[in-house]
Amino acid sequence: MSIPKTFAALFLLGTAIGVPAESKSPPFQPVQNVVRERTGLSVRWQQNADARAESLAQVRTLLKRPLTASSAVQIALLNNRDLLAALEDVGVSAADLREAGMWKNPSLDLSLRLPDRAPKGPNWEEAAAFDFLDLLLRPLRQRVAANQLRAVQLRTTDQVLQLAAEVKKTVYTLEADATLLAKRQAIQEVQRAALELAQRQHEAGNITDLALAQQQAAYNAVRLETASAENEQREHREALNRLLSLWGPDTSWTISAALPALPENEVALRGLESLAVAQRLDLAAAHQDLAGMVEALGLTKRYRYLGALTFGIDTERESEGPHVTGPQLSLELPLFNQGQTRIAKGEAELRRSERKVEGLAIVIRSDVRKFHDQLTALRELCRFYESEELPVRRTITAGLLLHYNGMLVGQYELFSARADQLEAELKSIAARRDYWTTRAELERAVGGSLRPRITKSAIRKNP
């Protein structure tokens, strides 16, 4: 058989089996399914201009209405540039999986030697070979690449859920900011009225310079607090703009009016740690990385004595003589390096990864307990304000107003009671804000959902 024919046969064989078939399940589908199950929202792999334009149109439609936690998260999933960049990791890893299923290209060596004396005919040699060891390792290499793809899918989905938690926290903060600022402005109006009364009384000689200065200082303090609240609101608004990747006219959105009410029932701690360990996708990704390392270490141990192994056909023809054709085998002899260091390194890396996985699981359980404890305490604090502190403050203000109408107390006592009531309302709103941001943290710690779900579209072993 001539070398051109041999090379052609190798080319046809590579064309037939060198390119693995496409997976029945698109590589991004598991990410979409898990995100939809845990958030009720959609995330898209925007692979072309049409998909990007469609997502941008949906974003601008959502921006026309006041933002809620859910709509803001949906905008972030469609528009956050860091997330869109991270989603491409799935495509890169899927391409690596296809690459792992391909054969290496065969090599073709040609040599031509010209004699320095008669006969003057050239001596030429041809050899075609392919890496036989690569053929043996192909199925194992595919399994390692498949493990890596699953880990990337899990890690990418975890990034989506982490972004959702950050957006929720920022939206809850902004919803509280609007109400807090309104209360600050109301307190400022009360203090302004008290200051105007003090100025009139000072002009009439009824109060001292010290008393007027004290009223002025109280008013100035409230003005500074109001200005600080306005500045915080602007900072939080910009934080949400960054999370949603908005700029230009798209930043003129509005936020929903107020924080949602507390849920009637609180989630119990029992079983929540186990749910978090089962649901946390970063932990699942770490387990998947660990499985890949076990697979790779087994591969190293199994083929530790095999180095380069190539097989092919060699043809040589003298200037005056027949063609000489025969098989060619190249084998690396493991005399000095038998893979000991590779195995020792792999085992050390495996132990290191095992400890990291265990450490991550411990941190996850600790976070669940911490945020659940905080959530319970904040719920009790919110109930205290709503059921005890605020009713008492309203009763005091109403009673002092009756006494004022009966000329039993002065205006300053009434102003002070009204300011104290507004301060209590401020603290109540802040407690409710902290409750919802902590709940978002707990959802993140548990894995995106506080309720266990049986998922049919989890990231399976064979993507």
Image (cartoon, rainbow, N blue to C red):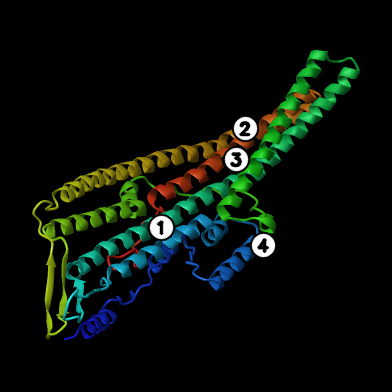
Q: Where is the C terminus found, in terms of image quarters?
A: bottom left
Residue 235 higher or lower than 314, as above or below: above
Indicate the amino acid at tag 3: Ile
Image position, residue 65 (x, y; %): 65, 61
Measured in 3D between alpha carbons, the distance from the residue under mark 4 to the one under mark 3, in whole angstroms, is 27 Å
Q: CB atoms at circles 2 and 3 under 8 Å apart?
A: no
- Residue 414: image quadrant is top right
Residue 321 higher or lower than 339, as above or below: below
Which badge, 3 or 1, is on the more N-terminal residue? 1
Image position, residue 236 (x, y; %): 61, 44
Tell me the tag on residue 429: 3
Which badge, 1 or 2, is on the more N-terminal residue? 1
Which badge, 4 or 3, is on the more N-terminal residue? 4
Farthest residue to the right: give it: 204
Element type at marker 4?
Answer: loop
Residue 463 seen from this side: no
Tell me the tag on residue 156: 1
Indicate the amino acid at tag 4: Lys
Q: Mark 2 points at which residue?
A: 392
Which badge, 4 or 1, is on the more N-terminal residue? 4
Q: CB atoms at circles 1 and 2 under 8 Å apart?
A: no
Dot 2 alpha-carbon crowd within 10 angstroms: few under 14, some 14 to 19, many 20 or more: some
- Residue 30: image quadrant is bottom left
Indicate the amino acid at tag 1: Thr
Measured in 3D between alpha carbons, the distance from the residue under mark 1 to the one under mark 2, in whole angstroms, is 50 Å
Dot 4 alpha-carbon crowd within 10 angstroms: few under 14, some 14 to 19, many 20 or more: few
Q: Name the residue under label 4.
A: 64
